[in-house]
Amino acid sequence: MRLHLKIWRQKNSQTSGKFVDYDVDGVVSDMSFLEMLDILNDSLSKKNEEPVTFDHDCREGICGSCGFMVNGLAHGGVPKTTVCQLYMRNFKDGDTVTVEPWRAQSFPVIKDLAVNRTAFDRIIASGGYISSTVGSATDGNTLPIPRPIAESAFDAAACIGCGACVAACKNASAMLFVSAKVTQMALLPQGQVERAERVEAMVAAMDEEKFGSCTNEAECSAVCPKGISFKTITRMNSEFIRANIFGSGNGE
Amino acid sequence: MKLDSKAPSGPIETAWSHYKDHLKLVNPANRRKHTILMVGTGLGGASAAASLGELGYHVKTFFYHESPRRAHSIAAQGGINAAKNYQNDGDSIYRLFYDTIKGGDYRAREANVYRLAEVSVNIIDQCVSQGVPFAREYGGQLSNRSFGGTQVSRTFYARGQTGQQLLLGAYGSMMRQVKTKNVELYERREMHDVVIIDGKARGIIVRNLITGELESHFGDAVVLATGGYSNVYDLSTSARQSNVTAIWRAYKKGAGLANPNFAQIHPTCIPVSGDYQSKLTLMSESLRNDGRVWVPKKQKDPRAPKDIPEGERDYFLERRYPAFGNLVPRDVASRAAKVACDEGFGVGATGQSVYLDFADAIKRLGHASIESKYGNLFEIYQQITNENPYEVPMRIYPAPHYTMGGLWVDYNLMTTVPGLFAIGEANFSDHGANRLGASALMQGLADGYFILPYTIADYIGGTPLQKVSKDDPAFKEAAKNVQNKIDKLFAVKGGKTIADFHRRLGRTMWDNVGMARNKTGLEKAIAEIKNLRNEFWQNVNVLGDKNNLNPELENAGRVADFLEFGEVMALDALKREESCGCHFREEFQTPENEPMRNDEKFAHVAVWEYQGENQQPARHTEPLSFENVKLTQRNYK
Ligand SMILES: Cc1cc2nc3c(=O)[nH]c(=O)nc-3n(C[C@H](O)[C@H](O)[C@H](O)COP(=O)(O)OP(=O)(O)OC[C@H]3O[C@@H](n4cnc5c(N)ncnc54)[C@H](O)[C@@H]3O)c2cc1C
Ligand code: FES
């Protein structure tokens, strides 16, 4: 297979970027999208041209490092798939493919396809955890958790923090990312103690990082490689209202 | 090189608690005056940073990833062991200890392994309290499964994403300390050197990967939690960026390197499909609970698996090892698969794979039950191979996966350099010559949550530590050397890509320092690696700028280190004239092709000491004594 690529090249955060055209040959269907870029990069270095920079690491869809827009869709638009697990069998010979970084004010481009997503870490630092000091835990089985609850908590906990939800949203909102964490903790008995403060702190941090607001387009969950449900946003909204009304006490 | 293991004597059951009771402490008010430099934020580094932050130390963390949550630990699939005996199936701390020592083919230190088994139970409690969504039974209790090399069910898991959930738990705890400013994050930093002042590790040189600036950081202790080096084989199940640089540079500063040749080849990985391949994907060992491994009884059988009748299949693990069957340890399963393929029974286009078949389990337990246990693994498999494992058996082949070798550490997890600690996969400590499944996560978290916080206090509390600053000549000198090396890489301007050298090194390692080794092959590998290294420094091409994000430069530095490290690995394999665990020397095997240990001469840890550029390193030994288990030939029949 031969592909025509239009790839965003940008030297660093201070300079502006532009699309550059490349052709890549010898693409086979069992190759991943990143392996196809590896081939392109190999051919660029052989020509003494600087390879295209993109973040990646695990290449099995779990670390959340990879992520960029392929033909305008986050991770290429195949359901529940990161771009490292996007296989070239989804393309055909002669296709033109546009590749550009996540576009969001809170995710500035560092170089080419690599962006800075450390805003997510700062949101987690604001309260996206259960405060449990090492050494103080009781036996794991003293707290039985109904299986359906554990399963739903897991579904939300599966978020890999790749940022596709933000990139897909026309408002560049981080609601799906934040609501996934809020949901995991709100469902679990361990998460009850800090339930109200957590949602308030995380929402405040999200605003501080200048993510946009949610207007219920659900583009985020449509592209989420881990299938995080839009229902988590509904839950977060209700958690937020609950916290506003009752606070962290019993509301009396 | 002095190798004092500091392993406590006396009854092993109480050794750690007794030892702990006599370690020095640091007064809570003084802790914030002590800075600890933590390199790496995988399970080892994140759990250690969280615990030390909670205690009140000032912890600076460094990692080349963008976020601590992206460390390679995130990819661990199958589970984590703990001697909880929730299943009432006879498990105990002793049994986990025994299985680990035996699984490691009697090449690990008893005291460390016992302590690991002992704290394993606290790890599960800690993780549950953090909200890690472990699998549950319908009654709400924690669920367990079995892993290879054991006859009990002691593995806790969170679907096929246990590493992700444990790391997110540790990361959350660490981020809580970031909020209190006890822990600081230095993301996209690569450690290039350890700085030693007055014979103690007092700092590091890191490169800011975005600006290219070399930064000096100082503190009272340095901890390396930098993971394993399976990528010396180029293709492995490790994340693409995992590398040996941190421990290799520490080795060059005087830290002993233990058993570097002990590298685990995992039996169940998706086979290679083409030259373009960038990594090998693991299919968790947990699959061997329900999957049956087989090859056709006829060589080069062209039939589709469903057309091969039961009687014409060789379930070779069940046949050779009836007691453990498909759940033999990894080294045993890998070698058996290799033998089957070498003899021409392999399947698939290349003949380099064997079947892992779920048909019986699906018949017995139903599609839904298999889906709930392994759904995401089946999905990954299908995504990659375009084959549906519910309908056709998976095809698997062994691949480099985990490295038991690493920096030598004493019972305090300190290397031979005072003040320099190593935890997680980066150290050599607990797995001997073969790691059992679900034990790496346990070890990383044991080190970080429950061991290092005690032993590092003993060091800080008991060591006079002079004030140091970045202006110390040792920092200037180290930074200059790092800069020279970077400049030298750019200066070559040759005609070959970095990937090309990595691929060729990987080939040599896989062919000669892989699943089966012999003297001739190892000598050949040493010569080939030397040549390849010379060629690299004459003909590599590194593009881009040094003052900008530049993955080419990062990769070039890592491959340059692998090209030195690979030679020591081969040398270590050459000098260990026995077979044990993963280290299978063809010259030393039983008539049934099982590894033959030589306890008289090799019941020791081999520790290599750097002797200078292009000099053969010196080999030292730490003798291993076994007082609580009897040395026998491992038998899984
Ligand atoms: C696919 C796969 C599945 C696995 N499944 C299991 C399992 O089910 N059960 C189990 O017990 N084990 C499993 N393992 C093994 C286990 O995941 C690892 O051994 C373990 O996670 C290693 O953790 P770590 O903290 O030591 O290092 P890592 O998680 O590798 O972290 C290394 C850290 O060091 C940093 N770093 C490295 N070098 C430098 C440098 N020079 N400068 C700055 N930072 C640096 C990185 O940024 C990273 O933060 C699996 C391994 C693989 C590959
Ligand atoms: S590279 Fe890890 S998710 Fe894609």
Image (spheres, coloured by chain):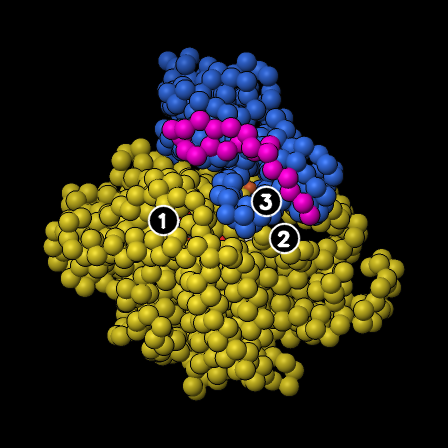
Chain colours: A blue, B yellow
Q: Which residue is found at the position 64% from the left and 42% from the top?
A: A24
Instruction: Identify the residue under disc 2.
Output: B276
Q: Quick check: A94 above or below B569?
A: above
Instruction: Identify the residue under disc 1.
Output: B190
Cα gap from disc 3 to disc 2, whole angstroms: 11 Å
Instruction: Identify the residue under disc 3.
Output: A40
Where residue A143 sits in the image (x, y, percent)?
48, 40
Quadrant where the C terminus of chain B sits is bottom right
Residue A59 visible in rendering: no
Looking at the picture, which amino acid does disc 3 mark?
Answer: Leu
Q: Which residue is found at the position 35% from the left and 57% from the top?
A: B488
Q: Which element is circle 3 on? A: helix
Q: Is residue B628 left or right of residue B296?
A: left
Instruction: Indicate the chain on which mark 1 is placed.
Output: B
Q: Nearer the viewer, residue B140 or B520?
A: B520
Whichever of callouts 1 and 2 sits on the residue coming sooner in the sequence is: 1
Residue B553 visible in rendering: yes
Instruction: Please give the range of residues in magenta.
Output: A6-26
Q: Nearer the viewer, residue A78 or B557?
A: B557
Q: Is residue B542 left or right of residue A42?
A: left
Quarter of the rendering containing residue B87:
bottom right
Quadrant where the N terminus of chain B sits is bottom left
Q: Is residue B305 left or right of residue B489?
A: right
